[in-house]
Each structure stands twice: as C-alpha cells, then as structure tokens.
Image: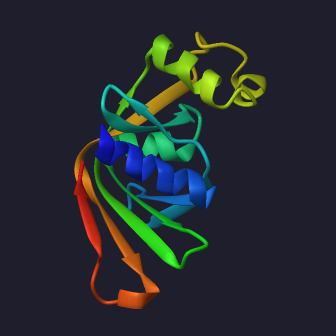
Amino acid sequence: MKNISEIIGFLNTAGVFFVGTVDESNKPHVRPFSFVMEWEGKLAFITNNQKEIYKQLSVNPYADICAFNSSDEWVRISGKVKLFQNIEANRKVFEIMPSLKEMYTSAENPILVCFSYEEGEAVFYSFESINKPFKTIKI
C-alpha cells in the first residue's frame, strides 16, 4: 500500500487534479476532481451514475489523471479502471470528505459510484528533469 499512499499523498497535496476520458466518438473530456482514497489496495475515486464520466468509463474503461504540485512536480496516472458500487466504500468516502454527504445524502444512495484503477502506472516528473520521469509506480 506504500505506493498507493504515495500517489494519494501527491494528489491530496495538489488539491485538484484532472481526470481525462473519451466519449463514444473518441473525443477527449477532462474535468477536475479533488477526492481520492485507497480502497482494497487500489487507487479509488467517486462519481455518480448520472454524469458523463460514468457513461464514458462504462464504454471505455481507460482514464488518465494529471496533477501538479507547488514543488514543480507533476504526476500522470494512466490505466484501466473498474466501476463499482459498495456501501462500505461509500461510508469511507464520507469519513474522508464529510462534505460529500451533503451532495449524496447517504452511503446507500444508488447514484454514488466508485471507480478504481485495476492496472496502470503513475509516472512522476519535475521541471528539473522535464524529459525524463524521476519515478514510476505500477498500479
């Protein structure tokens, strides 16, 4: 879990990170996210099943994330994700970010969906070594 914790720490330090997907006509879509957690040893996020990202990941389960921190470093996370609904995971979401309960009301809300990286990698870069990553973590 150390590697997942390192990725989560970076994303939390960045505060806002961007998740990219493609639609059914292969057009890219990027949107800001700010929630991430570890679930069953995997990097996990939330969305709801009414959003375009849910529809896009249902058709094409590949997503990229990019985040930048104040130390002039960034990470690019690429890989295949899995959508899932789990009440215990939802409860953890509310523990980590209680403000989300205002939006989703309860862990049993059927529109609340998690997605986790099942395979992929996180590649870390800095402006000191722009053309060469300084670390890669398989996920």
Residue 77 placement: quadrant: bottom left
Question: Which residue shows up at 35% across the image and 69% down it?
Answer: 124
Residue 78 at x, y percent in the picture: 31, 59
Looking at the image, residue 51 lies above or below residue 89: below
Residue 26 shows in this picture: no
Looking at the image, residue 116 lies above or below residue 110: below
Residue 51 at x, y percent in the picture: 58, 40
Name the residue nearer the viewer: 94 or 129.
Answer: 129
Residue 5 placement: quadrant: top left
Question: Which residue shows up at 58% across the image and 10% down it?
Answer: 108
Residue 90 placement: quadrant: top right
Residue 108 shows in this picture: yes
Question: Which residue shows up at 25% across the image and 57% down it?
Answer: 137
Question: Which residue shows up at 38% across the image and 62% down it?
Answer: 25
Looking at the image, residue 67 lies above or below residue 33: below
Residue 3 at x, y percent in the picture: 30, 47
